[in-house]
Amino acid sequence: MWYGKFESARVFEPRPSRQLLISLTLLYAATLALVVLMLPLWLALPLLGLLLWRGGRDWQCHYGHRRIVRLVAGAPGRWFVHQADGIRQEVTVAAASVVHSRLLMLMLVNANGWRGPLVLPRDALAAEAHRRLRVLLWCRGEPDTQEDEFAGETRWWRQFRLPRGSAGRE
Amino acid sequence: MDAEREQARLRWMCRRGMKELDQLLLGFFDARYATLEPLARQRFAELLEWQDPELAALLFGRMAPPDTECADVVRQIRECARF
């Protein structure tokens, strides 16, 4: 395989998540309802178009041809993703990623600067694989990129972020 | 014989309530414990006496190790988990 030189590469194969589908559907339905009911027509129409476009994009990312079907942890700091449409690329995991026992939200950044989230609720991976990925992310220490978009975040939120610390830095 | 019994005891202590720790500690014990220096073994055994929440905070980088020997063992455990 193209990443085959990493003998101990770790492979995770997310499946479409029902929890994520329900959450996104509720979120979009509530937003659409709010826009239609609360705003005047001249403002609601462009916003509806924007929301529908964004919803379609999210659908493609999580359930359509751009869905990530395989995530491979290569050498430390190197991650590889395979999309359903066959595209494969190397990415890094940004500091904005969230690691929690019920939810993994990895902010992936590729070489061109494209950023995209990989959201993995508990039902997106087998329980053991979800745990393995969590441990791997926690033990990798500092995130692969140094940006900190949530510098002002609360302490409560910060506990779910990838850990920092010299112990984990290669 | 005593050494074997001690190893078996430590391996048993690697089994924790928190499965993430289970995976981390058992993986390290099976892969690296035999190659550790006596001092590092002692520090590892001391670590196993910690409660799960504190141990998780230490191993997952949310808490600083209390001393350099402990930091070295923690570093080795984390390295082992990476690959």
Image: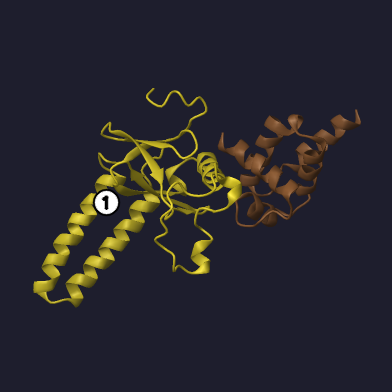
| In this view, A33 is above or below A59 | below
Residue hosting label 1? A58
The chain carrying label 1 is A
Question: In terms of depth relative to the viewer, which is nearer, A38 or A167?
Answer: A167
- The colour chain A appears in is yellow
Q: Pick the quarter of the image with the C terminus of chain A.
A: top right
From the viewer's perspective, tell me whether residue A164 is left or right of residue B6: left
Q: Residue furthest right?
A: B2
| In this view, A140 is above or below A148 | above
The structure residue drawn at horizontal position 33% and vertical position 52%, both measured from the top left corner, is A21
What is the quadrant of residue A148 in the picture? Answer: bottom left
Residue A11 position, x and y percent, is: 46, 33
* Amino acid tagged 1: Asp
Instruction: Count all numbered tags in the image, as a single digit.
Output: 1
- The colour chain B appears in is brown
From the viewer's perspective, tell me whether residue A100 is left or right of residue B23: left
Q: Residue furthest left?
A: A42
The structure residue drawn at horizontal position 55% and vertical position 45%, both measured from the top left corner, is A169
The structure residue drawn at horizontal position 81% and vertical position 34%, both measured from the top left corner, is B7
Question: In terms of depth relative to the viewer, which is nearer, A53 or B82?
Answer: B82
Residue A76 position, x and y percent, is: 50, 37
**Mark 1 residue element:** helix
What is the quadrant of residue A150 in the picture? Answer: bottom left
Residue A151 position, x and y percent, is: 44, 65
From the viewer's perspective, tell me whether residue B60 is left or right of residue A157: right
Looking at the image, what colour scheme do you see? Answer: by chain
| In this view, B21 is above or below A150 | above
Q: Pick the quarter of the image with the N terminus of chain A.
A: top left
Residue B4 position, x and y percent, is: 85, 30
Q: Residues within 10 Å of mark 1 (few under 14, many from 20)?
A: some
